[in-house]
Amino acid sequence: MEIELLTGRRILFWLSILSLVCLNLSCGGNNSSAAQRSGGDSLIKTRNDTALSLTGVWVNKAYLDTLLATGSPRAAISAAREPCIEFRSDTDKYAHIVFNFHEGEDEKILQKGGKYTMGDSGEIMALSPEEIRIGHQYFVRFKHPDREKYDYNIVEELLFAGNYQLENGAKVSFSGDGRVYGLDSMKYFTPNVDYIGPGLDVDQLWLGMDSDVYKSPKYAFKFISDTLLLYKLNCLEGYDSTDNSCGVVDFGQLKWKLIRKK
C-alpha cells in the first residue's frame, strides 16, 4: 500500500509548536499560569528554571511523526507502542502510560536530588513548556484531550479534523470531537487506534448516524497527501456471521473521495 507523505500538515503542526515555544520562552513569557491551572504544586522546571505543570496528556513524538507522515494510525502504533502518557495532576504520584491504546498502567513518579524519574522509564526532562523527554522517548503536549476516548481524541483532531470537498463539489467537515458534517447521512466517526487482533489488516474507522459510534459500520481508509479515501471493508477470509467479524480484510469498493481544503 503506497501512501504519500503528509508533508504540508506536518510542517504546519511543528510550526505551531515552535510558535508556542517562542511565546513561552523567547518572548519573555513565563509558565507560572500553567502550574496554577492544575491546582497543585508545579512538578518540574524547564531548562530556564520556569515552573512547569505536566498535568495533561503528552503524545509520543515517534507516534505523532509517523501518524502525520503516513496518515496511518496502524503504522503509528507500530512506531510507538506507548503512544501517550497522562499526568492526572501535579500532586498525583503516578503517571498513566498507555499501551497500544489497548491497555495501560500507572508508574510511580519519584523525586531525588531535584530530579524526577518515572518508574523504569527514566528521568523526566522538560525541554520546553510543550515538549518533554522521559528516558530516550520524547513527548509533546496535546491541547484538547478527551478522557472519554481511547485515544483522547488525538487521531480525530490531529489527522482527520478539517474541511474537505467531495468530487461533486459538496462540502464535508470532520471535527476534532468525532463529528462529521455533509457526508450523506453520517454524523459521527471514530478511527480505530487499537491494531491488536484479527481483521485489522488496513486502517479503519467507525462511521454512522449513532452517537454510540461502535454500533456503526466500519470502513477502511487511507490518506494520499491531502486526499482522504474511504472504502467499504472487503472480508477475504474468516467471516463470522454471528458478529459480522472477519479474520482477514482488505480495501473494498471506494465509497467516498474527499479532498482537504487549505
Image (tube, helix red, strand yellow):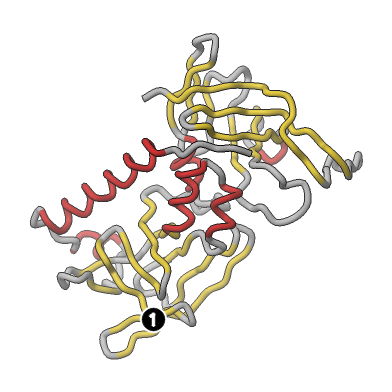
Left/right of residue 235 with respect to residue 163 in the rendered view = right
Where residue 12 sits in the image (x, y, percent)?
A: 32, 39
Left/right of residue 94 with respect to residue 194 in the rendered view = left
Mark 1 is surrounded, within 10 Å at the Cα level, by few (under 14), some (14 to 19) or many (20 or more) other residues, namely: some
Query: Which residue lies at the image location 26% right of the left edge and 72% below the top edge?
Result: 42
Among all residues in the image, which is located at the extreme bottom?
Answer: 113
Q: Is residue 212 visible?
A: no
Q: Is residue 215 visible?
A: yes
Q: Secondary structure at mark 1?
A: strand
Quarter of the image where one finds residue 86: bottom left
Q: Quadrant of the C terminus?
A: top left
Query: Which residue lies at the image location 85% right of the left edge and 42% below the top edge?
Result: 243
User: How many numbered discs sit on the rendered protein?
Assistant: 1
Where residue 51 sits in the image (x, y, percent)?
A: 21, 69
Residue 59 versus residue 48 in the image, above or below:
above
Where residue 116 sits in the image (x, y, percent)?
A: 34, 81
Residue 187 versus residue 29 in the image, above or below:
above
Quarter of the image where one finds residue 124: bottom left
Where residue 7 sits in the image (x, y, percent)?
A: 39, 39
37 or 245, which lies in front? Answer: 245
Left/right of residue 93 with respect to residue 201 in the rendered view = left
Left/right of residue 1 with respect to residue 153 in the rendered view = right
Among all residues in the image, which is located at the extreme left?
Answer: 28
Q: Which residue is mark 1?
A: 117
Residue 152 versus residue 30 in the image, above or below:
above
Q: Quadrant of the N terminus?
A: top right
Residue type pointed to by label 1: Thr
Query: Which residue lies at the image location 70% right of the left edge and 35% below the top edge?
Result: 218
Among all residues in the image, which is located at the extreme front?
Answer: 2
Among all residues in the image, which is located at the extreme top?
Answer: 168
